[in-house]
Amino acid sequence: MLAFPALILMIVSAASAAGAPPPLEDGFVSMFNGKDLAQWTGKPGGWRVEEGALTAESTEAHPCVKHHYLTWAGGEPANFVLRFRYKMIGGNSGVQIRSEPRPGFDTWGYQADIEAAGQWTGCLFQHDREAVVLRGFRAVIAADGTRTDTPFATPESLLAKVRAGDWNDYEVEANGARITLRINGELMCEVEDHDAKMSRKKGLIALQMHPGPPMKIQFKDLRIQILD
């Protein structure tokens, strides 16, 4: 008889091979039905569902000239664990958390960053501050914006854990002032953000489509556990 963990692994692997979403972990709820955009709002024609994944793409014939976001309609969570899988071919993208809406399908807040070139993948970004914390660092940011950054791994060694052009597992945990990013189970960065002007306590979750050269970004198996 198979041990219980091995049995679970076989079930998850079989579901993944069949293209079905894996079973939800305890305490998590699904954010995407794998079929349509029913739980999301965004720029008309900007996103589609392809092979069970939320997909945005730019081509030479149909370029993306301005960034836009696909926003989850499930609320504005504060403390949570967000898990999803992504695959990127070229370009730049990311997932906004604790964000507020802006005109033109835009948002403002924290972003768990993704980039094919690798500079920003696994970093926590915010448009007015850029790097809230870089990959390979733990940071503590005081109310006045002063900060202490402590390295725990090299950015290159962590980037080696990311599968370029293939599916990756991304986890974002936001709990109070602390935000932690993990890709494929590896800690990428962590910040304790007390900045009185720039830190965010709650807000929207949204997926980014970025302008620039041709690219394709896909997200699937999105699920969330609310901590509070």
Image (cartoon, grey):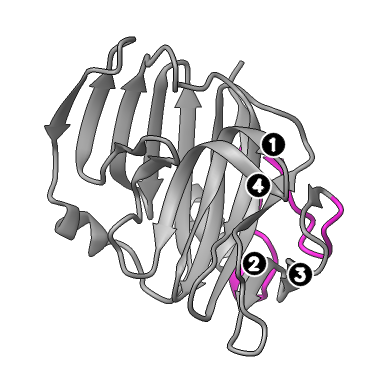
Q: Which mark is residue 106?
A: 4
Question: How far apart in space, not on screen, are marks 2 and 4 (Cα)?
Answer: 35 Å
What amino acid is found at the position of numbered circle 4 in the picture?
Asp
Tell which circle, 4 or 3, labels the residue nearer the N-terminal end.
3
User: Which segment is the magenta one?
Assistant: 15-38
Callout 3 secondary element:
strand
Q: Residue furthest bottom?
A: 61
What residue sits right under mark 1 in the picture?
101
Question: How far apart in space, not on screen, are marks 1 and 2 (Cα)?
Answer: 35 Å
Q: Dividing the picture into quarters, in which one does residue 140 lie?
A: top left
Q: Which mark is residue 170?
A: none
Q: Residue at x 54, y 59 (%)?
A: 85
Tell which circle, 1 or 2, labels the residue nearer the N-terminal end.
2
- Which one is in front in this view, the residue at disc 4 or the one at disc 3? 4
Q: Dividing the picture into quarters, in which one does residue 78 lie?
A: top right
What amino acid is found at the position of numbered circle 2 in the picture?
Ala
Tell which circle, 4 or 1, labels the residue nearer the N-terminal end.
1
Question: How far apart in space, not on screen, are marks 1 and 3 (Cα)?
Answer: 21 Å
